[in-house]
Amino acid sequence: MRFDGDCRGGCGPAAPNPPRPFKDAVASPPPGAGRGVVLCALDLTLIAVRFGRQLCGNLDAASEREWLVPDGLGGYAMGTVAGLRTRRYHGLLVVATRPPGGRMLGLAAIDPVLIIGERRIPLAVHEWGSGAIVPNGHIHLESFELQDGLPRWRWTVGDVTIEREIAMDHGRASVAVIHRVLRAPGPVALELHPLCTWRDVHGVRFAEGAPQVDMGADGFVFEGAYRVAGSGYVPGGEWYHGVHYRVETERGLRDLEDLWHAGYFATQLEPGQAHELVAWAGPAGIPPRRPAAIFHKARHRAGALIATAQAVDEVDRMLAVAADQFIVEGPRVVAGYPWFGDWSRDTMTSYEGLFLETGRQEEGRKLLVRTAQTLSEGMLANTSDAGETEYNTADAALWFLHAVGRHVQRTGDHDLAAELSSSLLDVIHHYTAGTRFGIKADLSDSLLRQGAEGVALTWMDARVDGNPITQRAGKAVEINALWINGLATVAILEERLKHDATDLRRLAQLARESFKRLFVSASGCADVVDPDSSQVRPNCLLAVSLPHAPLLEAGIVKVAGAELLTSLGLRSLAPTDPAYLGLHRGGTPKRDAAYHQGTVWPWLIGPYVEAALRTGVPVAGVLAGLEQHLWEWGLGSVSETADGDPPHKATGCPMQAWSVAEVIRARRMLQTRAATARRLPAVP
């Protein structure tokens, strides 16, 4: 097998066109750093997650903690601390065939077997349809850690310790797996057994005759889709029947499948020696990088991300690496792993946290320009995850206006404002005149109305059997807060370009006055008006938190804190509401019914913290639970959702873009406030 891309010169990131923010891998010091401090990628390593035998040997606990290594295209490697594949989405090579979507599972696992004399000691772990756990290699697992965002396992049997590391080649569908003998009295033998398939990540596959496997001296090609190569390949093939995925059982989805055992790789290693294996998809004529080069590139990239983000502590460093997992070629944003693709609402809501707070403004600019080119009748497509492009979102385009405004405000890039001026005005025009799904400004009060039969257009968009659970048709509070914010944002940008913004100002002023009159009463802030709904939900926070928010009411924040705030984010509905559902569990209909009826959403911590800071509501310690959460479920990341009821067990995607983005943003807001407080003169 030939490899490509060896590291030359010692420290290059080995990317053909690296993003400009990482070009030099050096950033200015963060606020409060001493003079002369320089953050360099080569000096920054991240070892933020580490577990020992007591957790690793507990199959249930170790299998609830998941790791992720993305390829920068939408594909990934993903699994659990224990090594047990608990989801049909888990595997070592998941390929985005239509980046960032069209994900196909290829190499599902590499099962190591340690051979000491006559003893064969399997180090892998599998669960079968019968309920059996065979083999149970997790009992030998001494430790697991994430170093620079890359997973590392160490198994110890007597006086022998074996280490495994995994990395992906950013920008290519290629994974490197290295097994190393750390300690042994002499040479030890190791067998590495690949388990393979080729199917949609959302499905399963069963044995139907032998797959096409083309074997060679150093590995094999599976069904023409991907290659697996390493030294010591021994050809073979048989189906393993009845692999069980326990999390899919909990989710009421198909939980059994068969995998193809494609021979094995045999090696004998002295202490300190390693076996390198690589699996990759793509054109046959393009060889992969050597595994060592893949690891070097990945570690250098992690250091560059940390430096560029000007991370000030361990949590900052973890979040900088976590943010990068969602930014893929384009650039685009993956909404969540392992099943979401590109969702415009999530992308625009995440924009400030993922791009501006991490020093990736130039990439963000490209994203905004590309997004503007996709506008249709003033709207952004919600997603094409299901195969067809859907425009069923009332707020994505409004979040786009917000993202452009924040970008220009924070970077001073008025050229971007000029370049996108017609696109921004196009959104305003269509929303004012009327566009899809009844989205139209009411001329009597300048507020936005939205809603149509069978659709839910706000972020609370769950449906069961085609029926919206939280349709919120009418004038929804956060839609109108975003609308007022968007009108003001575009007016400011137009005025800076010396364009007339009189009509925009008039619309914004009328909408602001109408908002205060219609949404605010002695009993609080309405969630929807016309028709009216006064359910206690977190949406009113956006009417306080946005840059041009119509309200500055501490009472709204206090109600949210008292009734919705948890250690992992905010509930989507107050527990005192008769419609409240405290558990986000069970089959798809049951989960979707609870999705926005009490389920906790971590992303809402951003609006909460910003609204609290604006109104003087105390926020000390509010992020403690979310910071601890980085070690608890999706390792180094923040989950999509959690149960509304204590103890708020995490649910949904283990890694979610807007959750990570808003935790980053909330931390930066609090860091800025703390830095400002330190600079204030002492009161005499």
Image: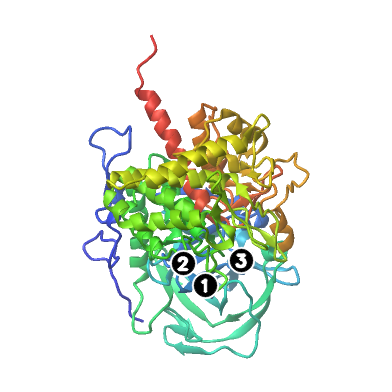
N-terminal label among 1 and 2: 2
Q: Amino acid at mark 1?
A: Arg
Q: Which picture quadrant has residue 137? A: bottom right
Q: Which picture quadrant has residue 136? A: bottom right
Apparent side of residue 531 relative to residue 298 in the rendered image (left or right)? right
Closest to the observer: 591 or 317?
591
Which-is-in-front pick, marks 3 and 1? 1
Q: Is residue 249 above or below residue 324?
A: below
Mark 3 surroundings: few (<14), some (14-19) or many (≥20) residues within 10 A: many
Outermost residue toward the left?
A: 9
Mark 1 surroundings: few (<14), some (14-19) or many (≥20) residues within 10 A: many
Question: Which residue is identified by label 2?
Answer: 74
User: Callout 3: helix, strand or loop?
Assistant: loop
**Does residue 346 appear in this view?**
no
Outermost residue toward the right?
A: 578
N-terminal label among 3 and 1: 3
User: Callout 1: helix, strand or loop?
Assistant: strand
Residue 217 image point, x, y percent: 42, 87
Question: Which residue is identified by label 1?
Answer: 103
Residue 474 image point, x, y percent: 63, 50
Q: Which picture quadrant has residue 577? A: top right
User: Callout 2: helix, strand or loop?
Assistant: loop
Closest to the observer: 546 or 666?
546
Q: CA distance from mark 1 to mark 2?
A: 8 Å
Residue 368 image point, x, y percent: 38, 57
Which disc number belongs to residue 85?
A: 3
Which disc number belongs to residue 272?
A: none
Outermost residue toward the front?
A: 444
N-terminal label among 2 and 3: 2
Q: Amino acid at mark 2?
A: Gly
